Image (tube, rainbow, N blue to C red):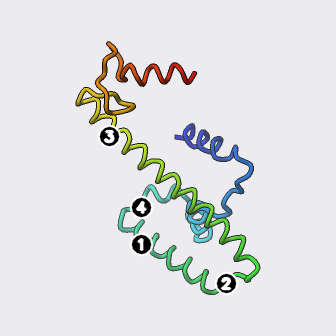
Amino acid sequence: MSDMASLLDSIYNSDQRVSPLEKTAEAAMLEQLGQSGQTAGALRDMSTAELIALATQLEADEGTEKTASAQPAAAEPEDTSELEKVAYDTFGGQLMAHAFTHELGLMKVAMINGKCRVCKENAMDIQGSSICSACHAEADSAE
């Protein structure tokens, strides 16, 4: 598990143009647990009902902190631009994932029907290949 975490950290921390988010949900939770004198290990011993109650309490505490401390107007444009960037990146990722899975579905249907997976119109006429000779020739000429 730690190998996966270190891999993801190395992937997402390699882009120096993107500043890391100051506060993540995990950091906020660990901070709240530290303030209440609990440790992350104590979470393993809690029942589901106790965890839900703790999460509800932390959400309520965070909500009161946000209303109690209003941010200055000068910080809003920077925070807004960071949020817009995160929202844009998230939407772009979701859009690409949906397009990718849609294309895979179209390729699957074409191949089931004996059609080329690229153009989805011509029959697969090359032995052992999932594309037609026209698409194969076009790919060779592009190189």
Q: Amino acid at mark 2?
A: Ser
Helix, strand or loop for disc 1: helix
Tag 3: Cα neighbours inside 10 Å, few (<14), some, or many (≥20)? few
Q: Given this view, does label 4 or label 2 mark the residue nearer the observer?
A: 2
In this figure, which residue is indicated by the disc labeled 3?
105
Which is nearer the eye, 86 or 53? 86
According to the picture, the residue beneath numbered tag 2 turns out to be 69
- Residue at the image point whose x is 29% and y is 33% from the top: 110
Please report whichever mark, 3 or 2, sits nearer to the chain's N-terminal start: 2
Which residue corresponds to mark 1? 53
Left or right: 44, with 86 as reference point: left
Q: Residues within 10 Å of mark 2 (few under 14, many from 20)?
A: few
Label 1–label 4 contact, CB within 8 A: no
Residue at point 27% right, 36% down?
109
Please tell me the numbered disc located at residue 46.
4
Circle 1 residues within 10 Å: few <14, some 14–19, many ≥20: few
Q: Secondary structure at mark 2?
A: loop
Tell me how far mark 3 sits from mark 1, CA to CA. 43 Å
Please tell me whether mark 3 or mark 1 is closer to you in this view: 3
Residue depth check, mark 1 versus mark 4: number of the one nearer the observer: 1
Residue at position x 50%, y 75% from top? 59
- State the CA–CA distance, disc 2 to disc 1: 25 Å
Separation (CA) of disc 1 from disc 4: 10 Å
Q: Is residue 80 left or right of residue 50?
A: right
Q: Secondary structure at mark 4?
A: loop
Q: Residue 94: x, y in percent?
A: 47, 53
**Sequence-wise, which precedes: disc 3 or disc 1?**
1
* Residue 131 sits in quarter: top left
